[in-house]
Image: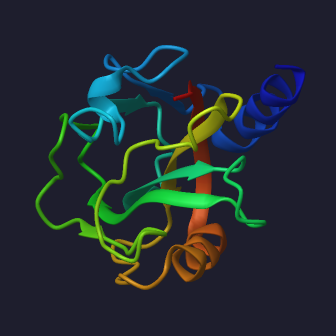
Amino acid sequence: MKKILFVLVVLCHQASAQTFTLKSDDLGGQFSETFTCSGENRSPELHWSNAPAATKSFAITMYDPDAPTGSGFWHWVIVDIPATTMAIKQNSLPAGSLTSVNDTGKPGYQGPCPPEGDAAHRYIITVYAVNTAKLGTTSTAAMTGFMLNKAAIAKASILVYAKR
């Protein structure tokens, strides 16, 4: 928890006087089955506030650093979300946005699916405020992440756990 608070402090300093914040009405500390591979595999509702004035678009990622791959697992990557968008509804995307390929090799949302019996995995959901209207990539998650980190002017994250 201390590590998460440190990251938020750094991001607050970068954003401005008001904190760029990501929240979800669907998510608490743990994913409910609805949003996992064992359930309906629905993407959660997300909403954010206090984005920097220079924001030209948003992007969203969901990453599991605990996946037994040696490099984690990207579950969801969305780019080119219009700057006027401050929320996405459950299981839907705003017009104009692009979904990159996740680590299953397909575009779209892949809900948490840690191996049965593993300790709870951490899922980091991040919204990026981006300095360009169109990142324009549906490449791999790793390449999209590289481009996002170059174009991000601020980001906000939530941490959610899942176990099977």
Residue 89: quadrant of the picture? top left
Q: Colour scheme in the image?
A: rainbow
Q: Position of residue 141 (x, y in %)?
A: 51, 73
Residue 121: quadrant of the picture? top right
Q: Is residue 84 left or right of residue 4?
A: left
Q: Position of residue 71 (x, y in %)?
A: 74, 66
* Residue 29 drawn above or below residue 71: above
* Residue 45 in sight from this viewpoint: no
* Residue at x 65% of width, y 68% of height: 149
* Residue 112 drawn above or below residue 54: above
* Residue at x 65% of width, y 35% of height: 122
Identify which residue, 148 or 161, lies in the foreground.
161
* Residue at x 28% of width, y 41% of height: 43
Q: Is residue 61 left or right of residue 38?
A: right
Q: Position of residue 90 (x, y in %)?
A: 19, 34
Q: Is residue 127 left or right of residue 83?
A: right
Residue 114: quadrant of the picture? top right
* Residue 61 drawn above or below residue 1: below
